[in-house]
Image: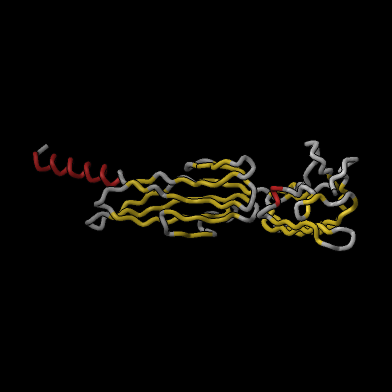
Amino acid sequence: MKPKILFAALVGMLAVYTAWGQTAEPTVTFHDKANDADVEMSPGESQTMNAPLEIKLTANVKADSYWSYKCEWKIYNMKDGESKPLVDRFDETTSFTLTSSGAYGVKLYITFTDGDGEEVEYESEAFTISITESKLSCPDGFSPNDDKINDVFEVEYQSIVKMKGVIFNRWGQKVYEFDLSNVDQGWDGRQNGRYVKDGVYFLNLQAVGSDGIKYDIKKAINIMKGLRDYDE
């Protein structure tokens, strides 16, 4: 091989190597409320979670200064495919909240452009996130007597995206209310710092699930603290 041809071949190989050196290490992160832990996903991984789920997308681009680039995130319902994305974002870092049940794909596309206008395309493997269908239930009563057994009124739920609950006494007076922001703390049977009296109370609970199911629960709640006097 002549020296000039050899030199040109080496330059070509170097250019290809440099071009394909432009890449990314994208991640999808979210907080798992059930385990109170942050989760980081890599391309090709899958998770099943409850809604609402806020996901943060980070491109982590690896590029030489010679190259400019444009990012594109696509979030799509798996049944429709990535050609019909729910979200099309062009930021390196962005976020989105999944509120409907189903399986979703997340992919990152990057177009790298060098100083001569040459373009190199990057496409990540898909992240897969499945959102569960909704569930909602609550107890018929509890006994807030500090014996560590059934002391708190707790709502059990899964993939509920809207919730509003109010508990009334038998005279129709509101003694407690909750929504998604405070439902996990439960009700300890107190009103204004004091335990309410034993008896029957009434729950009015409306909610909407990730699958579109609407819940309208109206039921009696029995409070029985036992023989100890908590009202004095």
Residue 13 is left or right of residue 184, and the answer is left
The residue drawn where x is 36% and y is 51% is: 121
**Looking at the image, what colour scheme do you see?**
secondary structure
Residue 215 is left or right of residue 125, and the answer is right
Residue furthest front as drawn: 232
In terms of depth relative to the viewer, which is nearer, 139 or 126? 139
Residue 31 is at least partly visible in this image: yes
In terms of depth relative to the viewer, which is nearer, 202 or 79? 202
Expressed as whole percent of the image width and height from the top left, the position of residue 129 reads 57, 47
The residue drawn where x is 52% and y is 55% is: 75
Expressed as whole percent of the image width and height from the top left, the position of residue 218 reads 84, 58
In the rendered image, the vertical position of residue 1 relative to residue 91, given as above or below: above
Expressed as whole percent of the image width and height from the top left, the position of residue 212 reads 70, 58
Which quadrant would residue 21 be assigned to in this image?
top left
Q: Quadrant of the N terminus?
A: top left
Residue 210 is at least partly visible in this image: no
Which quadrant would residue 205 be assigned to in this image?
bottom right
Expressed as whole percent of the image width and height from the top left, the position of residue 214 reads 75, 59
In the rendered image, the vertical position of residue 15 relative to residue 87, given as above or below: above
Which quadrant would residue 148 be assigned to in this image?
top right
Residue furthest left as drawn: 3
In terms of depth relative to the viewer, which is nearer, 11 or 34? 34
The residue drawn where x is 58% and y is 54% is: 77
In terms of depth relative to the viewer, which is nearer, 184 or 111? 184
Q: How many marks?
A: 0
Residue 128 is left or right of residue 157, and the answer is left
